Amino acid sequence: MFNTSYLNVDFPIPEGYLLLRDETPSIKELNRLLSQSKLETHNPQKLDLALKNSDFFLSIVEKSMYNLSGFVRVTSDKGLNANLWDLSALPGSNQQLLMDVLIHNSISIIKRELPGCSISIAA
């Protein structure tokens, strides 16, 4: 379950969803999202460590059920590089829009908090 620290969005999020920053989803929920998105899941201990070592991450949750619907985590060397990892959104009619929300808001945060970093997406 998530706390409710909402993020001011730079790229609008669809009605019925919330964009959260640094609210850690459960490892089980995150691996479920990755699996449903046809992405590789991770060993729970390694995924927990990856989350702890991330600079920040964004989660999209559906308001009504508070289900995890999108996720991305960001790492950086705080000088030259910032990387987006585990970018995923539930398949369906909103999938591309949710991915756009995650990418655009991540890039906006990186530009604001880690200026000068080049950005890559691990896909």
Image (spheres, rainbow, N blue to C red):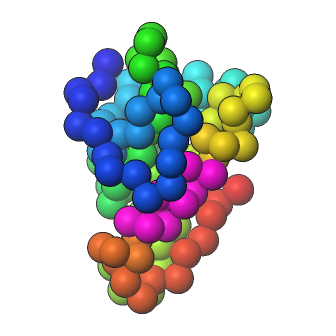
Question: What secondary structure is the magenta-colored segment mainly?
Answer: helix
Q: Which residue is drawn at 66% across and 43% down?
A: 97
Percent position (x, y) of residue 118? Answer: 53, 82
* Residue 74 in view (yes/no): no
Percent position (x, y) of residue 58? Answer: 42, 46
Percent position (x, y) of residue 69? Answer: 55, 28
On screen, 82 above or below 20? below
Whether the magenta-drawn stretch holds residue 105 is answered as yes
Q: Residue at x 54, y 60 (%)?
A: 104
Q: Quadrant of the C terminus?
A: bottom right
Figure disc tally: 0
Identify which residue, 4 or 14, lies in the foreground: 14
Identify which residue, 64 or 86, lies in the foreground: 64
On screen, 24 above or below 86? above
Q: In which quarter of the image is the N terminus?
A: top left
Which stretch appears magenta? Answer: 100-109
* Residue 46 in view (yes/no): yes
Position of 58 with respect to 98 (left or right) is left
On screen, 108 above or below 29? below
Q: Residue at x 50, y 55 (%)?
A: 11
Identify which residue, 74 or 15, lies in the foreground: 15
Percent position (x, y) of residue 12? Answer: 50, 48
Whether the magenta-drawn stretch holds residue 38 is answered as no
Q: Residue at x 44, y 67 (%)?
A: 108
Question: Which quadrant of the view contains residue 66?
Answer: top left
Question: Which quadrant of the view contains residue 110?
Answer: bottom left
Q: Looking at the image, which residue sits at the far top?
A: 65
Identify which residue, 42 or 85, lies in the foreground: 85
